[in-house]
Structures are given as C-alpha cells and as structure tokens.
Amino acid sequence: MKLLHSIKLSFISLLKTWPGMVLTYLVLPIGLGLFMSMTMSVEYEPKIEDPNIEIAVHDEDNSATSKALYNLLISQELDPYVDFPESSKVDYTITIPKGFELQEGTLRIEGRASASRSQGAILEGILDQLIRTLNEKSRIETLLKNHGRDPRELQGLAQDVVEILNQKVYEQEKIEAPNVLTARQHYGVVMLAFLFTTFLSGWIQESSRKEGIGLRKRRGILPLSIAEATVMDILTGAIICMLFLGAYALIWTGIDPTIFPSNPLYYGVIMAAQSLMLSALAKLVGEVFSSKASLVIVQIVTIAFIVLSGMIPLETMTGLEVFRDIAQGNINALTTVPYFNLMRQNSIQSIGKESLILLGITVLLGGFTVLYLKKKREYKK
Amino acid sequence: MKLIRLVFLRIKQTLKSPSTLVMLVILPVFMAGFMAVSTVDKMTETYTNVAIRLEEGDLKDALKGDYGKFFTEDSLDEITRRLSDRKVVAYYEFPHNFLEAYEGKQNPKVKVYSLDGKQKDVVFEAQVENTLKKIVLGEKLYGEGLIDNPKVDFQGESRVRLDYAGVEADGGTMLIFFMLIFFILMNGSIVSADLVDLKKNNVLKRLVGTSNSSYFIMGSLIGAYLVFMIGFNLLAAVVLSGIFGYSLQQFPVFAANIAAISFVSVSLALLLFRLLDQPETCLIVGYILALGLAALGFLPTYFETNLLLEKVSYFSPVYWIMESLDKNSFFPQVPIVILMGLVLFTAGSHKLENYVNK
C-alpha cells in the first residue's frame, strides 16, 4: 500500500510539470531513437549527385583514351565543360596530360580554394577507378594487337567476363541463436540505458528539490524512516522507468521491429534489473549533487560506459590491446561490473547472475544514499 | 572599458562554478580529444570483424594480405558462439571449389551467417569482387594463350593527383573543431540555466539596479559567456591539434566558425531564458534543440538525393558550418550563421530589462 501511495504521489508530481516530463521522457528519447534508427537503416555510400558540382576537362593529350575518359565522366552523371575559359568558374579542373594514352604523366585535379574537400576526394576516387578501367582495356587491346588478333575479340572476352562476374554469390543466412541480442537490439538496449542514466537523475533531483516525491514529502505524508523512504524512491523510480521503457519498446518495435529482442522475458528481466540499478544510482547522484552537476556526472559516466563496453572499436583505432581486453571482458576487475557484462554477453544465460549482481549494486547504492541522508541536517528531524 | 571590466569580472565568477566549468570546458575538450585519439593513424586500416572460411587457392592468397587474421577453421557452432559474444558480426563460408565453380558460371553460393541475417562487410565483399575480376580476366587471357602468367595486373598504379588552390583540409583538425562546435551549441542550455538561476536568485535584478546601465549589465553577462566560449574553445583546438600533430592551415575559417556558433549558442540561451523559467527545463530544451539542429544539419549526408530535406537543413547553423569547414570558405556560410544568431539575439533581448525586473 505504501508503495502504491508512493507511486501515485510521484505521478502527481510528474504531471504537475508535464511539459518538462513530455520533453524529457517522450520527445527526446523517441526523437533520438527515431533519428538513430533512421541513420542506421540508410546505407551511406559516397556519391556525387550534387547538381552544383562543376568540372572542366582540359585535354592536353587529345587521344582516343582521353576522349574515352571524358565519355566515362559523362556516364557518371558529371557534365564537364570541355574548354577554358568556362573552366575558370568551375570547382574542379581536370587536366589530362600529354602522353596519357601511352601511360605517361599523371592526371591532375585542381580544386578551387572554395571547392568542397569531401566532393574532391570522391571525384579523385571516381577518376582513379575510371583510369584503371581504361588502363585495363587499353592493355588488353595492345596485347591482342601484339598477338595479331582482332581487337574486336575483346568484346566477346569482356562479355564472357561480365557474365561470370554478374553471378550473385552471397546468400544471407540467419543463425538461430535464441535469446541473443543482435547488434541492433543491443544498440536499442544501450540507448535506453543511456537515456535513463541521464534523465532519471535529473528527475529525482528536481522532484527532491520541489518536495514532490522527495524524502521530506514521503516522511510528511507517509510516516517513513529515511531508509524506508529511500527504498520507496528507488522502487518508484524503477517502476516508472520500466513503464516508460515498456512504452518505448512498443513504439520502437512498431517503427522498427528488428530493434527489440523477440524474447520478452529477456527484455523484461534485464530492463527491470537495470532500472533498479539506474534508479538507485540516480537517487544517490540526485541527492548528493545539484541537477546541473548530476547531469555532468551522469554524462561522463555514460561516455565511460560506452567506451568501456566495446561499442567503439578502440583496439582497432588505437592499436592498444587493453581496449580489446576490456571489450571482451578479459580484465577481471571490470567483469565484476554487471553493466558492462550485460552489454557484452547479450545472453539469457547470464540473466540470473547479472541480475543478482545488479541487485547487489542497487543495495550498495541505496545504502550509501541512506548513510548520506542520515548525516544531512534537514532530514534529521 | 567599463564593459570589458564587467565582462572579465563575470568570467572570473563563471570560473568559480565547477559544474559550468566542466560542461563548458572539460567535457568538450575531453570528447574532442577522445575522438582525436580514436582517429590517429589506425582509422586508415581496414576494419572488419568477420570470420571467413575459404580453402587454399588463388582467391585466399590474394585476400591474405588484408584479411589473413580473419580466416578461420571453426565449426558453425563455434562461430555461433562468437557471433553471440559479438566477437564477429558475420561469417563468410565459401563452398568447396568455389573458384572453379565461379569461373564455370555454376553460380556457387557464399553463405553469410549473422544473427539477424542482414549483417555484411561491404568493404570485404568489394575486395572479393575486385580480386575475382582480376583472377577471371587473367585466367581468360591465359586460356587464350595471350599471356604466360595468369597473375598479371592490367589496372596498374593510380595516376591521379588532387590539389587545391587554397589550403589542404586536415580531417583530424576538422573532427576536433566539429566536436567543439557541437558542444558549444549544446552549452547554450547551460548558459540559459545559469541566467535563469541568476534571475531566480534576484542577482540580475540587483545588478540592473546598480548605477551601471542595464544594457551594460546584460551585455557584460552575454559578452562574458561569448568571450569565455570563444577563448577556451580556440585554445583547446590549438592545443589538441598540436598534441595530435594536425595541421592548422584552416585555422582562420575554424576560428570564424567557432565565434559564429558561440554567438548562436549564447543568443539561443538568451531566448530560452526568456521563454522558460526553470533551469532544468532550460537544460533539457537546450539539449533537445542542439541535438535537433545537429540532426537537421546532417540530413543531406544521409539523404543526398532528397532536395527537400536539403532545403530543410538550411535552417540549421550546423549545415552551414559543415559546408564552411568542407569548402574552407567564410562566405556566405559564416555570415548566415551570424544572421541566425542575430535573429535569436533580437528575439531574446527584446525588452530584456523589463523581464529581468519582473
């Protein structure tokens, strides 16, 4: 009954500041989720399709090969000017050097001072590929000529090669690994954990300060001890956290069915355990620090979580093997932190052990909070 | 002189607030430094976490250089475990006699196993395609008796050189500056929360009530944040670029962008201060706005062909800053960002004195 009453009070307090609640718990998480989901579902392939990009070709070679290169550029939907002075207005001037057909000289791309560096890099890549294709064709033609064969044979040869290369060789297979999160599902869980680590502390701090759902209110309305009131706050925070997580799960599953685990038991237990720990963490941070400081602390902790969880391939980036060890759980001290394990293991087998560790941490955090509050003068009465 | 003195007085006060200092200085520098560390040298290496099963032969020999450590003899059960532990994201299983069947147009299938049946490594697949092309072409020409060795490279070396009339871009410096710029925009929320706190504690009222003009007081407050943001971020950018050995050739453009976005951030803070009366609400609204503006600025990157989305992204200062950094140009991007700041500043400073005295 006390718990129900506590939850009711919390909801009343939340609803009193509903614009903040809507922004914090609905607009931001769902907006972030939608944006991240959107960017993850789009395969980003650099390509020049900007109609503003203008190139000029200055052909010093004036050979069949340089003309073929020009035609290939047109086939890439680039529409080059062919001569100066129009080229003075363009972003990039491509100079095909004398002797290009004879495999001599280097093709030069000269970008204007204000030309886009990223588009320039893409243009360089496209030209490099086109030249390699031309080289290939010209060398094979020369080969045929040297052997007294008709270069038209090349067409037949090319067609044969293309037929071979056109075979679709890859076949995607889904591996049945029940209760294991896929990369996207794992990402969904981490996103939720991230959002709640950040915002729960702000909420509890704000509520405490407003005497809405804080200890003073609890002790006034429900005659509770500091320990009881702390437990109530942690439980209330976890339950509200779970309610919102459930709502997000439903919304996101509707938008992108691949992002959440199909096994509700896995999701439920992990989320309940995480909610409890996060709520306890938020309670401690919220009581000890101001709302602004708690936001800073929680952001730093969250960044550390993401770094240490191995979400970012730091080993490859830095060459330091310690990052691989951290990501794979080979450092004993870190494997005792369940948050990392949850993000690494993704397995239903680890639910029991991990949940127990999470509960242990929740108790520890709650204990620290009670000790801190008992020393706080305003709660001594 | 009086205004400058007031500005520096305010900066001194700001430096005394640990949480503001962390949010405005330490966190952005930490994140920019972290991103810089993450991109040093190793970013150019092929990054993959796939497992490949392929029997010995020409294809494996050609791929060994880049993918040698990813070849495996593990069973599918062991691969499943590795997939579950997220040590690999996909497993490529080439069938027996793949190359022979491929060259014989028998349509052999490479199975790509993953947990969701969708993961793949596009870089690896592109490299396999390119290698297959070389092998097939070599074999064909060898079969025709045109060459003595089927392993001939007909494509040759790259013969393209790219130069700019202006300075070259340095990706590392761009990354550091972009991270700082993003945090500057986000820190508008901290500034607005600070202003709300000052108003709630009647500090602003008392300041406006002194012999100094209220414009001087508010100007010093806004100016202090502006000087603080520009000064610290420029210093941080120079130090970080120096540590990581990045070029500062584009410094004038970067500095102009940092100054412009700082003005937008402070103006946004002023507007939030006028609209909202709780510091916590300022923090969250500012945070959402910064993320929203950044997302808006990146829309064309993800939807290149969508002209409508590109037009929408013009409303974000982040879009113009990205363009300015990419093109190493001031015009028209930097003035547009400043104009955006002016719009916000005008809205935020309208009858500010009355609002402060309320």
Image (cartoon, coloured by chain):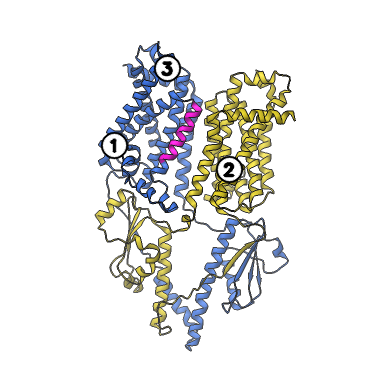
Q: Which of A255 and B40 is in front in this view?
A: B40
Residue B262 point in image, percent of width and height:
63, 38
Residue B174 point in image, percent of width and height:
57, 50
Q: In which quarter of the image is residue A7?
A: top left
Q: What residue type is labelled 1?
A: Glu
Residue B143 point in image, percent of width and height:
38, 82
Report the chain holding disc 1: A
Q: Nearer the viewer, residue B83 or A78?
A: B83
Chain B drawn in what color? yellow
Check if mark 2 and mark 1 are on a common chain: no
Residue B164 lies, with reference to residue B188, above or below; the image says: below
Report the chain holding disc 3: A
Q: What residue type is labelled 3?
A: Lys
Residue A48 lies, with reference to residue A341, above or below; the image says: below
Quarter of the figure with the N terminus of chain A: top left
Residue that mark 3 sits on? A376
Q: Main secondary structure of the magenta part?
A: helix
- Please identify the residue farthest to the right as the structure is shown: B1
Q: Is residue B306 visible?
A: no
Q: In this view, does B199 lie to the left or right of B113?
A: right
- The image's mark for residue B236 is 2
Seen at 41% across and 14% down, the residue is A379
Seen at 33% across and 51% down, the residue is B87
Check if mark 3 and mark 1 are on a common chain: yes
Residue that mark 1 sits on? A354
